């Protein structure tokens, strides 16, 4: 028995279990699909016309495409490159047989050391009372100092330079003498004593003083011999020479040309930290970190360097 079903001009033949379909020739598409009519399978290799997700380019490694919203890398003094000529972190300080060694991280080999145990400062480590924001400090009790052997990287007369230190001091104004060496490298040619100095509690002040020669001194206000950790820095850019405390300029000398470059460099003579061999001008306080730059430190770089110290030590 054979049946023929006609819907519009579409035809469906069912005979002996086989199904034959005839499509409609009605341009209006008036025919209806039967329930068992299969929809065409889409080509999965092509995106749909209305797809909002673009097909990745197989030739691009998406893991290497920079994220426009990503934060820039955190600043570190290493980003200043070879201009960093001295970098001392207290966390690296170590007592050694008969003295102490403070390794220089700058790569220039300007390690600070002391060969005599009686004149060696000590480390207050990161977990002890007196540490600062989880970092150790090198402690000077008034009889200690460190020496750095001279090298061309510590001779700054022909260049701009900058020097920053995170420290605190308690030298009183009545000490004899009251001022204490933070860093010094000079030639003993009285009365000028040319060479870069930084002192804490300079005579007439209980703050900080820095100078290139006797006639080129700049200083902060007093009252900073209170044992509070601060960032103290100086920078020579062009001819201007400034002193900065806690990220702010506190004094400026517009013309700081080096009158005697050879004497200023003190070639062949060591640099000192925290005091000197003669057991005068001795620091009573703590140093957490020192960074010295030979060359121009731009304003944006100085801002980022100061931000590095403030963040690291919670200043």
Image (spheres, rainbow, N blue to C red):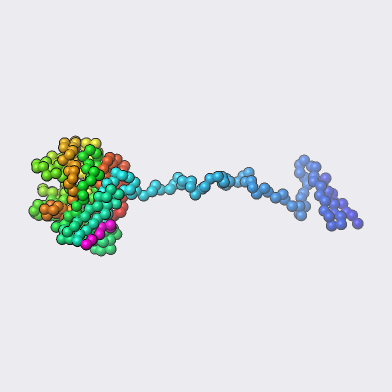
Q: Nearer the viewer, residue 201 or 26?
A: 201
In the rendered image, residue 236, in percent from the top left (x then y), is placed at: 23, 40
Is residue 226 shown left or right of residue 306?
Answer: left
In the rendered image, residue 90, in percent from the top left (x then y), is placed at: 26, 56
User: Residue 257, relative to residue 84: is it above or below?
Assistant: above
Locate the N terminus and report the quarter of the image it occupies.
bottom right
User: Residue 115, relative to residue 77: is it above or below?
Assistant: below
User: Residue 207, relative to residue 159: is it above or below?
Assistant: below
Q: Is residue 226 in sight in this rendering?
A: no
Q: Residue at x 11, y 55 (%)?
A: 279
Q: Residue at x 16, y 49 (%)?
A: 199
User: Residue 126, relative to residue 27: is it above or below?
Assistant: below
Q: Residue at x 86, y 55 (%)?
A: 15
In the rendered image, residue 207, in percent from the top left (x then y), is placed at: 16, 49
The magenta-colored residue range is 91-97
Q: Nearer the viewer, residue 132 or 142?
A: 142
Q: Nearer the viewer, residue 128 or 18?
A: 128
In the rendered image, residue 133, in percent from the top left (x then y), is placed at: 28, 58
Q: Residue at x 52, y 47 (%)?
A: 61
């Amino acid at each position: 028995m054979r049946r023929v079903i006609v819907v519009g001009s579409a035809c469906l033949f069912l005979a002996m279990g086989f199904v034959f379909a005839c499509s409609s020739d009605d341009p209006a598409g008036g025919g209806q699909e039967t329930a068992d009519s299969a929809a065409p399978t889409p080509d999965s290799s092509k995106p749909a016309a209305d797809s909002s997700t673009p097909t990745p380019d197989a030739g691009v490694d998406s893991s290497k495409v920079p994220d426009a919203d990503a934060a820039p890398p955190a600043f570190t003094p290493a980003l200043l490159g070879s201009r960093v000529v001295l970098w001392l972190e207290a966390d690296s300080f170590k007592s050694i047989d008969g003295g102490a060694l403070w390794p220089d991280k700058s790569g220039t080999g300007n390690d600070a050391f002391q060969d005599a145990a009686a004149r060696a400062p000590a480390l207050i480590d990161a977990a002890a009372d007196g540490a600062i924001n989880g970092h150790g400090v090198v402690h000077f009790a008034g009889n200690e100092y460190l020496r750095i052997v001279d090298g061309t990287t510590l001779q700054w007369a022909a260049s701009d330079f900058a020097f920053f230190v995170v420290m605190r001091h308690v030298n009183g104004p009545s000490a004899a003498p009251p001022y204490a060496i933070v860093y010094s490298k000079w030639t003993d040619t009285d009365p000028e004593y040319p060479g870069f100095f930084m002192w804490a509690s300079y005579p007439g002040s209980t703050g900080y003083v820095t100078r290139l020669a006797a006639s080129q001194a700049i200083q902060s206000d007093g009252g900073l011999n209170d044992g509070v950790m601060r960032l103290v820095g100086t920078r020579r850019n062009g001819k201007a020479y400034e002193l900065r405390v806690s990220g702010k300029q506190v004094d400026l000398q517009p013309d700081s040309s080096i009158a005697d470059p050879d004497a200023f460099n003190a070639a062949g003579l060591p640099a000192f930290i925290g005091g000197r061999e003669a057991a005068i001008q001795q620091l009573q306080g703590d140093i957490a970190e020192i960074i010295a730059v030979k060359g121009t430190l731009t304003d944006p770089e100085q801002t980022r360097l100061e931000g590095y110290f403030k963040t690291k030590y919670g200043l």
